[in-house]
Image (cartoon, rainbow, N blue to C red):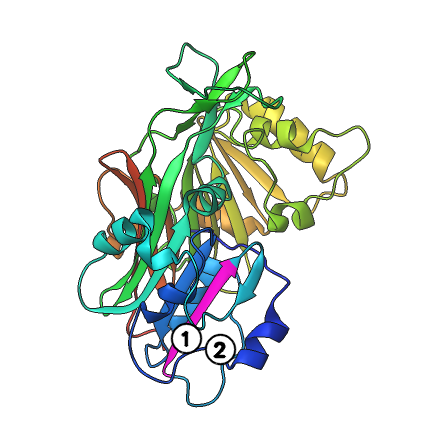
Amino acid sequence: MRTALVLVVGAAALLAAGCGSSTPSLGAGAAGVPADAEAYVAVRTDDPNWRFFVRGVLGRVPKVAAGTRVLEVALVHGKLVVPHGSAAHPLAKTLRYQAARAAMPGGLHGIAYLSGAHAAAQLHEIPGEITITTIPFRVRRVLHPRGTDLIARLPYRWGAAWLTDDGMGWRARSGGPPVLRSLNGRGAEQFVAPYTERLFDEIPADATMVLDLPLPPQSWESMPELPAAVRRLVPRLPALDLEASLDTIFGGESALYRRPGGEVTVVTSPADTAAAQRELTYLFPKGGLHVTTLGGQLVVSTRPKGLAAFRGGGAKLSSKVQVPELVTFVVYTQRYLAWGELRGGDPTVTVHFNRHSG
């Protein structure tokens, strides 16, 4: 999973307030958070994965005062703040927050509430998870359409995340069909259809990091903004529509993985492998990549041995990694295994930590 938001404000307020409670209770601070908060996190700092949890929700980990047993922090109007006192209209009293809490399991070491808009923003950061359809679609129109957005957007009521001994979970509560705010709608968002992961049968077993996900047509063009890592890797060239180029290169189930020694390999199944290779040449005119095709697969690696290992007959990753039959993405590292699913129409994420990873 790659749901990393970037926040650059609020650190001074956190340091001044001490960054949390001194007693191990979860959720008490919600009474001091305004109802329109974008997110609220409460987590026990004795859990070895608490930093990973906070970063997954807020995109960064604030400094914590010595002796803090429970960190509580909220994102309010774009700023990180420490809950204190009682808010006039507290988040704790809202039906959205109460529903998010009710969705969490027992044995909690950390909890997080996300507004529907904040949960949707995190989903949009995963390529291919939310796509655009132009075929006939069912939408919900607002009573007084305003603005110029021609795409009907998927609404979410709230998001919830939790941390337990078993790992981490995340859920966004669906708000129904896409909402159209313009009378001239030309498309609608839809969540990607779950797929059966197959590439783990071909990826070498010594891979140390894997991102596997489905990439329907126009996956990259559907993203409001390309991930920062992609922008750094592929700088924009003159007269280049980067999103369209990426949509030409990638298609179907796609995987990016790293192996010991720094080798990075990408496997995808574009609609036209020849056109994909031409786009690669344009994006990387100085070369440095090793490319081959295997049937309808395009395999790109930073080293020749990456191609050989992928098509070779050695041990494969599927021998040691198992995920549900239908998923929306998979992330594997030496520290954790994560995957997305659709449960009752709601996007969910499950993270299992490797207890032997240190």
Q: Which badge, 2 or 1, comes first in the chain's sequence?
A: 2
Q: Can the viewer see residue 315?
A: no
Which quadrant would residue 332 be assigned to in this image?
bottom left
Residues 336 and 179: in front is 179
Q: Quadrant of residue 207?
A: bottom left
Q: Position of residue 67 (x, y in %)?
A: 42, 90
Q: Position of residue 228 (x, y in %)?
A: 63, 50
Residue displayed at 32% across by 77% down: 47
What element does badge 2 sit on?
A: loop
Residue annotated with mark 1? 71
Left or right relative to 116: residue 10: right
Q: Residue furthest front?
A: 88
Q: Is residue 342 magenta?
A: no
Is 71 one of the magenta-colored residues?
Answer: yes
Residue pictured at 51% horizontal, 59% vertical = 75
Q: Quadrant of the C terminus?
A: bottom left
Where is residue 256 drawn, in percent x and y? 48, 47
Label for residue 120? none
Q: Residue furthest right?
A: 238
Mark 2 closeness class: few <14, some 14–19, many ≥20 residues within 10 Å:
many
136 with respect to 10 (left or right):
left
| Helix, strand or loop: magenta stretch | strand
Type of residue at label 1?
Leu
Report the span colored magenta: 69-75
Label drawn at residue 19: 2
Q: Could you say whether the residue bearing mark 1 is in a helix, strand or loop?
A: strand
